[in-house]
Amino acid sequence: MKNLAIVGTGYVGLVTGVCLSEIGHNVICIDIDQGKIDKLNSGKSPIFEPDLEELMIKNIKSERLYFTTDHSEAFKNSEVIYIAVGTPQKSDGFADLTSIEQAAIQIGLHAKRDVIVVTKSTVPIGTNEKIKNIILQYLVSDIKVDIVSNPEFLREGSAVRDTFYGDRIVIGAECQDAANLIEEINKPFQIPIFRTDIISAEMIKYASNAFLATKISFINEIATICEKIGANVEDVAIGMGQDSRIGYQFLKPGLGYGGSCFPKDTNALFHIATHEDYSFALLKAVIDVNKKQQTLLVDKVKQRFGILEGKKFAVLGLAFKPNTDDLREAASIVNITRFIEEGAEVIAFDPVAMQNAKRILPATVQFAQSIEEAIHGTDAVFIVTEWKEFIDFPLNKYVELMKKPIIFDGRNCYSIIKMMGYPIEYYSIGRPVVNENYNK
Ligand SMILES: NC(=O)C1=CN([C@@H]2O[C@H](COP(=O)(O)OP(=O)(O)OC[C@H]3O[C@@H](n4cnc5c(N)ncnc54)[C@H](O)[C@@H]3O)[C@@H](O)[C@H]2O)C=CC1
Ligand SMILES: O=C(O)[C@H]1O[C@H](OP(=O)(O)OP(=O)(O)OC[C@H]2O[C@@H](n3ccc(=O)[nH]c3=O)[C@H](O)[C@@H]2O)[C@H](O)[C@@H](O)[C@@H]1O
């Protein structure tokens, strides 16, 4: 059992802190956001993540999990300090390392005993070395500092599960004693550990996200061709995935990838390559395909209606994926903004992301309290996030409640065969249109 500090209580920091306390460590989480820390200290999670709050409360009660805004208090007894602050995209495409640099300065100023600093945040190649240099530059106490890169692979919406059942834990280190200690801390998770040097660990994270993004853009391109030739992309993906070298995962076509990571990390890796005088042409294509994919439904609806002015649209799903309240780079934002610009009226519904959405979406967007309220009297429904509620929603209700039942499904929630049994015009991604122009 070790004394650990985690800097940053966002998706990664909070989940990491809670899970490390659950396997027996003493964990203190630090954030500069007083509001977040107050909320955490009152037993409430500031983010929606399945199982997180229950596990958090359990470990607070067991006195293994604490929250503070005071770096000096948090670092005083910590043998290991994890950095899990944000690394958002800057306007030039590179990662913004301001929070990382701040965290490194605070470690330099406040660490009081020999310490291993573990970087969980996704950072450009060479950043761990920079972190070490900043810490040493600001170091007040006479202590030894080692750096370990331990990139995070969890997904939002299944973050707790991913932490307990991940495929691998990557540990990049120069000092083998430091790597041994991080391995020992993680042992109770019983997840295979892969050890390497720091730079390779940094690259593993970017390469993994870029590869997953490539799979998504690839299947989205195949989906577009399927629409043109009359094939069904879902069958194509199954037939491809049966080859274990390809696999089924991340071959789900839709409105492209959103979220806080794939868009920023693909851009960051592209810029890292460019900085090294290499044009990463494949990754550039992945990024371009994704941009086009996000607004595919706008093209489809314009083709169907001509002009959108005066139409009333329901948008089901605002989060960038189900089981999260996160709207960062969500397809809902670009689509809704385009609908409003084109003169349509928009009423939106999401089971958990509406509070966050109200801060981001144009002020004219209306919000419904249920699917029924959202779709009532509308000219078309757009499914942007594949929440289970939408998948399970009785199809006859679209027929009953909409002006004329027309669905543009950006996430292929319903089977084509099932849709054929309803008088609903149904446009999805990479599959034949059902009842085309039925209501015209
Ligand atoms: N969100 C995700 O699913 C994943 C994110 N990552 C990476 O992990 C990193 C963190 O991402 P998120 O958790 O999504 O970020 P986030 O934006 O949700 O949280 C970051 C937190 O750090 C706090 N913070 C900033 N500077 C601080 C400082 N000096 N001291 C203490 N707290 C400070 C902020 O107030 C904020 O609460 C990023 O590099 C991201 O790319 C990696 C894997 C998954
Ligand atoms: O670095 C990160 O932050 C994380 O980024 C992703 O996790 P996340 O963004 O939470 O969610 P995903 O499930 O990967 O979905 C990302 C986006 O891709 C889309 N997607 C995913 C899979 C698919 O087959 N098709 C598809 O369009 C989703 O709708 C979503 O918009 C990775 O899956 C994690 O391994 C990684 O740790």
Image: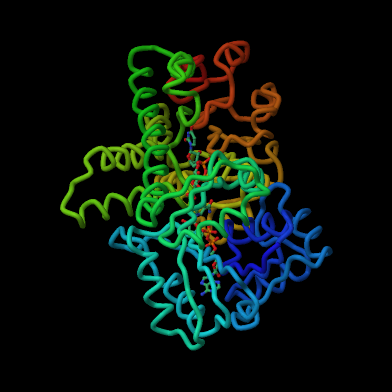
In this rendering, would 348 be left or right of 132? right
Q: Residue furthest left?
A: 277
Q: In this view, does 236 lie to the left or right of 51?
A: left
From the viewer's perspective, tell me whether residue 96 is left or right of residue 75: left
- The x, y position of residue 413, in whole percent, is 58, 27
The quadrant the N terminus occupies is bottom right
Residue at 68 percent of width and 49 percent of height: 188
State the image coordinates of residue 246 (x, y, percent, origin top left): 42, 23
Residue lying at the far front in this picture: please name it.
177
| Residue occupying the point 43% across, 78% down | 135
Q: Which colour scheme is used?
A: rainbow
Q: Where is residue 410 in the image (x, y as percent from the top left)?
A: 49, 32
Asked whether, in this view, residue 300 is left or right of residue 416, the answer is left
Residue most toward the bottom? 140
Q: Closer to the camera, 396 or 63?
A: 63
Query: Image height check: is 183 above or below 8?
Result: above
97 versus 339 height, above or below: below
Among all residues in the image, which is located at the extreme right? Answer: 61
Residue 401 drawn above or below residue 341: above
Residue drawn 34% across and 13% down? 229
Q: Which residue is drawn at 19% across and 55% down?
A: 276
Q: Is residue 112 above or below residue 429?
A: below
The number of numbered discs placed on residues in the rendered structure image is: 0
